[in-house]
Amino acid sequence: MKRFSLNQATTRGWPLPELAAGCVAAGVTQVGLWREEVQEFGVSATAELMRSSGLSVTTLCRGGFFDRPDWLSSNVTAIEEAATLGAPVLVLVSGGLPSGSRDVDAARAHIGESLGTLVPYALDAGVQLAIEPLHPMFCSDRCVVSTLGQALDLAEPYPAAAVGVAVDTYHLWWDDTVWSQIARAGAAGRIACFQVADWITPLPAGVLLGRGLPGRGCIELRRFREAVDATGFTGPIEVEVFNEEVWARPGLEILADTIEGYRRFVE
Amino acid sequence: MKRFSLNQATTRGWPLPELAAGCVAAGVTQVGLWREEVQEFGVSATAELMRSSGLSVTTLCRGGFFDRPDWLSSNVTAIEEAATLGAPVLVLVSGGLPSGSRDVDAARAHIGESLGTLVPYALDAGVQLAIEPLHPMFCSDRCVVSTLGQALDLAEPYPAAAVGVAVDTYHLWWDDTVWSQIARAGAAGRIACFQVADWITPLPAGVLLGRGLPGRGCIELRRFREAVDATGFTGPIEVEVFNEEVWARPGLEILADTIEGYRRFVE
């Protein structure tokens, strides 16, 4: 359990103090947090709660959305929040096509340039930005970065301390080039975080909330973990599941199921 | 309009005699047909209806589903049906993961071997099999072939007259390698068919019936058509849209809208 991290999205709705206490009781020492929930509780208050609970923050989700007019100020703020929380990584969901646009190449190029603008802030704060390739079904409305290869191409011009990638099983499992791209990411020191969720069908309307707890779906989760580890990665393994049926249950139960799935199918 | 072909799925529910008459009235000379509808009307009766209406059949959808126990007999029958209809191409939806399996590599390898078994039947019948890469959101349940590159790798061991690929904008638009793979497909003589549909969000539950008529979404359809044409491809351009709201309208109206979208956004 040393590497396990509970991403807060898996137990959405669980108040932060209860989440912290539940993690401590379950022997969990790491969590991934989300900006909205952190802001609601207060950034400093969250940092203090985590510290006093003995919990490390593995990632803050999420920056990005470079298609929005306020992308620069909102990402600078997100980097500051990550630093306050002691989170070494800010996960970026880079945004889809601007409204009315069909120019996916331009949207991708804009992300590359925007990253360059953020690099000094990231280095100053000691926070690594993690470009997260999202499943291609999110290409138009959430993230035009669809493969790990694309994410690495975007990261390449910048120092690895400033720009890495997020390896998320849910988004990448279908891609037969993912194994060589994981090796490439590891060799470049750019695996900023490793996140786990399972793929289940049928997908719900809107397709956002259809992820499965580890083991409930068809992804070779252990193969992913082994591929990431084979590069020398020894960082946290975050379980991040968005699922309305899961969320309807008490946080403690979800956490127990998440840990059980992690032990059986990932560890 | 010389290259336009109406894929029957776009006007689902339109009885074949009305579809044929509607196409003739609109100056459409080519259609893509679906096995279920053809079988219901009768394969020979359909062939005769098409002939007497002066309509060519550009593709028959669909063979494939190599994950099912009866894949061999059903594909052999499908090849025969395509030959009876004078359709030069049988589109293959290759099937997802077998029930309970997580082994996507094995599923892909099985498709490659199954194609080899079908090659003699295809050559005998003069029907080219078209491996259709489906959007990665269908990887687990419909088709483990997710990219044009994968489809071409699977086709490569076999003669182009027997095994080609389907280029469908809906499935491939998110992939930044698609342009080089279209060039590769064309150079190898493997573009068996070119199908057009647009990408719209939000996706409906199950994600199958969320396609848009040409121009209603975010895909650079003309860029696709030009890329396919740049390889020397001069074949039909099929519009194939699955959309329940579209299907609720009269066939003649759908056809008119389809032609208008084709003229404005594809031609």
Image (tube, coloured by chain):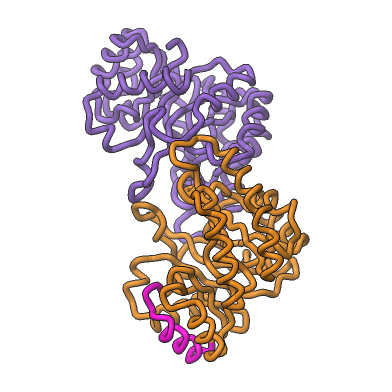
Chain colours: A purple, B orange
Q: Which residue lies furthest to the right in this view?
A: B187
Q: Residue at x 49, y 80 (%)?
A: B260
Asked if the magenta segment contains residue A156, the reply would be no
Magenta span? B12-27
Q: Nearer the viewer, residue B81 or A113?
A: B81
Asked if the magenta segment contains residue B26, the reply would be yes
Q: Residue at x 50, y 77 (%)?
A: B43
Q: Position of residue A153 (x, y in %)?
A: 66, 38
Q: Is residue B254 above or below residue B138?
A: below
Count the labels in the image: 0
Q: Is residue A131 above or below residue A95?
A: above
Q: Can residue B109 be seen in this view?
A: yes
Asked which quadrant contains residue B223, the reply is bottom right
Q: Is residue A84 above or below residue A104?
A: above
Q: Position of residue A255 (x, y in %)?
A: 31, 21
Q: Is residue B38 left or right of residue A205?
A: right
Q: In this view, does B172 lie to the left or right of A74?
A: right
Q: Where is residue A52 in the image (x, y as percent from the top left)?
A: 32, 7
Q: Nearer the viewer, residue B59 or B231?
A: B59
Q: Residue at x 37, y 74 (%)?
A: B13
Q: In which quarter of the image is the N terminus of chain A?
A: top left
Asked which quadrant contains residue A32, the reply is top left
Q: Is the magenta stretch mostly helix, strand or loop?
A: helix
Q: Residue at x 45, y 70 (%)?
A: B9
Q: Can residue A139 be seen in this view?
A: no
Q: Where is residue A216 in the image (x, y as percent from the top left)?
A: 38, 32
Q: Nearer the viewer, residue B46 or B108?
A: B46
Q: Is residue B188 left or right of residue B58?
A: right
